[in-house]
């Protein structure tokens, strides 16, 4: 048995040493369209129920999936074929759920991809054909029709002995361009809007204020900061919302990020933003290894002795190996992300060691950032 113990020591130096804070480099600018979402301009989720036909014996077992049998009968009745008195026993049909995202401002006749997923006990949808299926939105209205050949990108094979080999998920697939938009979509009218709200992907007071300032610098009085997430805009007189948004989305803004450290303890990954700062601190990392070796020794009585017996005597060898401590690495007050990484790398620490060190620095009050453990 060889248990290993890791010891980390983080010692706070005297607070009397004061150093000038490092100046962070200028952040890169981003387009407004890349950091915000425009109100109403989004995909709409659609869903539908249908059947996939033409499967090579890999469909639903109708005894276990009565809804598949009912779907077959209903589909055939719509085509003028009455099968209510019959009991079909096919394995070439599977009941599926069809899901898709209707693109914003999709015009009638435009096509988009759909995802098809089995809901019964079908073994594979590979090569099957989805029969025309209406797709509905949250409003309960049909917005599109889906039909086409299902492509799973998976491989599945089985033998007579019951052994199977599969790669990927053969019971779910896609139909490229398998849906066609019907009607006028969701009815959202962008051009008639008088006010639109821009929602920041990463809410922040500074970034939201900069977005409003950049827009007002180009279009005076057309942007208003409502909170760290939302900036409301209205087009200038004589201009519609569509053309105004087209000009606003390409304006560049310098974004601001909070000081945050993200730790994934399972994968051993540490991510830090450039705004992370460290107060004056000294760090030393060392290892302590305790080794316990168990062995057995045979004890025998002397020759011609009386009453002696042979016995096995356990022997234990315990040793302590303490790695010689490395030199302290000192980070000055206001040290930047680069200084922190360079200091920890100088100790030769692993990512998992760095996680423990950062958490200890935070406990000491020397890490000026928020730590989020995932």
Image (cartoon, helix red, strand yellow):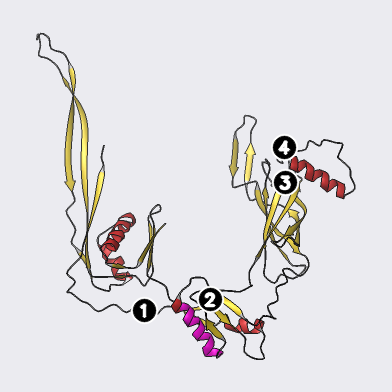
- Disc 3 to disc 2, C-alpha distance: 43 Å
Give the main secondary structure of the magenta stretch: helix
> Mark 1 and mark 3 in contact (Cβ < 8 Å)?
no
Check disc 4 and report its element: helix, strand or loop.
Answer: loop
* First in sequence: mark 3 vs mark 4: 4
**Mark number displayed over residue 95:** 3
* First in sequence: mark 4 vs mark 1: 1
Q: Percent from the top left, x then y, of residue 300?
A: 14, 16
Q: Is residue 278 visible?
A: yes
- Disc 4 to disc 1, C-alpha distance: 64 Å
Q: Is residue 92 visible?
A: no
Specify the segment rendered in magenta. 207-219
- Disc 2 to disc 4, C-alpha distance: 52 Å
Q: Quadrant of the N terminus?
A: top left
Check disc 1 and report its element: helix, strand or loop.
Answer: loop
> Mark 4 and mark 2 in contact (Cβ < 8 Å)?
no
Q: Which residue is mark 1?
A: 25
**Mark number displayed over residue 230:** 2
- Disc 1 to disc 2, C-alpha distance: 27 Å
Q: Is residue 213 magenta?
A: yes
Check disc 2 and report its element: helix, strand or loop.
Answer: strand
**Crowdedness near tag 1: few (<14), some (14–19) or many (≥20) residues, C-alpha within 10 Å:** few
- Disc 3 to disc 4, C-alpha distance: 11 Å
Q: Is residue 282 left or right of residue 351?
A: left
* First in sequence: mark 3 vs mark 2: 3
Q: Quadrant of the C terminus?
A: bottom left
Q: Which residue is mark 4?
A: 61
> Mark 4 and mark 3 in contact (Cβ < 8 Å)?
no
């Amino acid at each position: 048995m060889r248990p290993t113990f890791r010891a980390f020591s983080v010692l706070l130096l005297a607070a009397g040493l004061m150093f000038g804070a490092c100046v962070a480099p200028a952040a890169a600018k981003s387009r407004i369209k890349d950091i915000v979402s425009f109100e109403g301009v989004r995909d709409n989720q659609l869903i539908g129920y249908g059947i996939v036909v033409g499967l090579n014996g890999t469909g639903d077992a109708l005894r276990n999936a009565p809804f598949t049998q009912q779907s077959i009968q209903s589909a055939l009745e719509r085509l003028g074929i009455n099968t209510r008195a019959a009991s079909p026993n096919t394995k070439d049909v599977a009941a599926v759920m069809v899901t898709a995202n209707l693109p914003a401002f999709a015009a009638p006749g435009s096509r988009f991809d759909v995802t098809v997923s089995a809901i019964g006990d079908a073994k594979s949808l590979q090569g099957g054909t989805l029969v025309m299926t209406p797709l509905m939105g949250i409003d309960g209205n049909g917005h599109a029709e889906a039909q086409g050949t299902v492509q799973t990108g998976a491989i599945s094979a089985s033998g007579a002995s019951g052994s199977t080999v599969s790669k990927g998920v053969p019971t779910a697939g896609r139909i490229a361009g398998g849906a066609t938009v019907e009607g006028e979509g969701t009815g959202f009218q962008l051009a008639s809007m008088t006010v639109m709200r821009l929602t920041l992907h990463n809410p922040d007071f500074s970034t939201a204020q900069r977005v409003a300032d950049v827009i007002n610098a180009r279009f005076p009085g057309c942007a208003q900061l409502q909170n760290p997430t939302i900036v409301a805009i209205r087009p200038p007189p004589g201009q519609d919302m569509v053309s105004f948004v087209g000009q606003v989305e390409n304006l560049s803004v310098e974004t601001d990020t909070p000081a945050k450290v993200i730790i994934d303890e399972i994968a051993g990954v540490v991510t830090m933003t450039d705004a992370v700062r460290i107060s004056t601190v000294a760090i030393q990392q060392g290892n302590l290894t305790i080794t316990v070796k168990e062995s057995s020794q045979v004890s025998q009585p002397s020759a011609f002795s009386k009453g002696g017996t042979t016995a096995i005597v356990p022997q234990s060898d315990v040793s302590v190996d303490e790695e010689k401590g490395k030199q302290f690495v000192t980070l000055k007050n206001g040290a930047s992300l680069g200084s922190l990484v360079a200091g920890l790398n100088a100790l030769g620490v692993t990512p998992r060691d760095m996680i423990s060190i950062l958490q200890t620095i935070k406990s000491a009050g020397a890490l000026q950032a928020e730590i989020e453990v995932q």
